[in-house]
C-alpha cells in the first residue's frame, strides 16, 4: 500500500536523531574531563548522516554513515597543582563547546519531535481514509 514509506522515512530520521542526541550527551558528559596527555584526551564525537534515495521498492530515509571524532586539538591549561598535570604543569581538556552542544541537542530534539508529528499525522490521515469506506 502506498504511503507506508513515510513510516520508514520518519523512523530512520528518529533513529538518526537518537544517535545525534547520544553523541551530544557523551560530549557534554566528558566536557570537563582533563588528562595529563593530549593523546588520551577525550575527543568530541559527531555523527555523519547519509540520505538515501528511494530504491527499487521505494524505500528512502536517513542512515548513519558513522560517528567520527573531532580533529580539534585539546585545550592546554597551565594548572601545576592539578593531580593529572604533566611534568610541565599542563593539563589537557577536550575542545568541547558546551553551548554548541546544547544548541545541537535542542535541534536534534526538535527534529525528533517533528518526525513523531509526521508519524502521528500520517496515522490519523490513514485512519480517516479508512473511515470513509464505512
Image (spheres, rainbow, N blue to C red):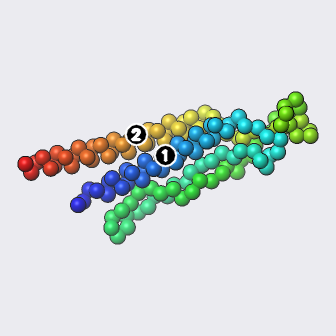
Find the residue positioned furthest to the bottom.
Answer: 56
What percent of the width, then of the height, locates residue 52?
A: 44, 61
Checking the image for residue 113, the label placed there is 2
Residue drawn at point x = 56 percent, y = 51 percent: 47
What is the C-alpha distance between the residues marked 1 and 2? 11 Å
Left-right relation of 108 to 113: right
What percent of the width, then of the height, locates residue 95?
A: 71, 41
**Quadrant (top left, top right, bottom left, bottom right) of the N terminus:** bottom left
| Mark 2 closeness class: few <14, some 14–19, many ≥20 residues within 10 Å | some
Camera-near label (1 vs 2) is 1
Q: Secondary structure at mark 2?
A: helix
Checking the image for residue 87, the label placed there is none
| Mark 1 closeness class: few <14, some 14–19, many ≥20 residues within 10 Å | some
Left-right relation of 54 to 66: left
Evaluate if marks 1 and 2 touch, with contact meaning CB atoms under 8 Å apart.
no
Q: Which residue is mark 1?
A: 18
Residue drawn at point x = 86 percent, y = 37 percent: 85
Find the residue positioned furthest to the right.
Answer: 87
What percent of the width, then of the height, locates residue 21?
A: 52, 42
Residue drawn at point x = 63 percent, y = 41 percent: 27
Pick the residue in front: 29 or 79.
29
Is 16 above or below relative to 52? above
Is 107 above or below relative to 58? above
Left-right relation of 7 to 36: left
Figure label count: 2
The mark nearer the N terminus, 1 or 2, is 1
Residue drawn at point x = 92 percent, y = 39 percent: 88
Amino acid at each position: 500500500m502506498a504511503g507506508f514509506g513515510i513510516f520508514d522515512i520518519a523512523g530512520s530520521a528518529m533513529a538518526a536523531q537518537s544517535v545525534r542526541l547520544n553523541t551530544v550527551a557523551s560530549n557534554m558528559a566528558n566536557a570537563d574531563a582533563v588528562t595529563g596527555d593530549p593523546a588520551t584526551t577525550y575527543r568530541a564525537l559527531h555523527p555523519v548522516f547519509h540520505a538515501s534515495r528511494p530504491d527499487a521498492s521505494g524505500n528512502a530515509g536517513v542512515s548513519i554513515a558513522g560517528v567520527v571524532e573531532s580533529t580539534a586539538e585539546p585545550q592546554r591549561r597551565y594548572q601545576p597543582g592539578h593531580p593529572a598535570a604533566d611534568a610541565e604543569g599542563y593539563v589537557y581538556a577536550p575542545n568541547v563547546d558546551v553551548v554548541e552542544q546544547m544548541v545541537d541537542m535542542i535541534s536534534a530534539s526538535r527534529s525528533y519531535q517533528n518526525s513523531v508529528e509526521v508519524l502521528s499525522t500520517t496515522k490519523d490521515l490513514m485512519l480517516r481514509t479508512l473511515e470513509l469506506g464505512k
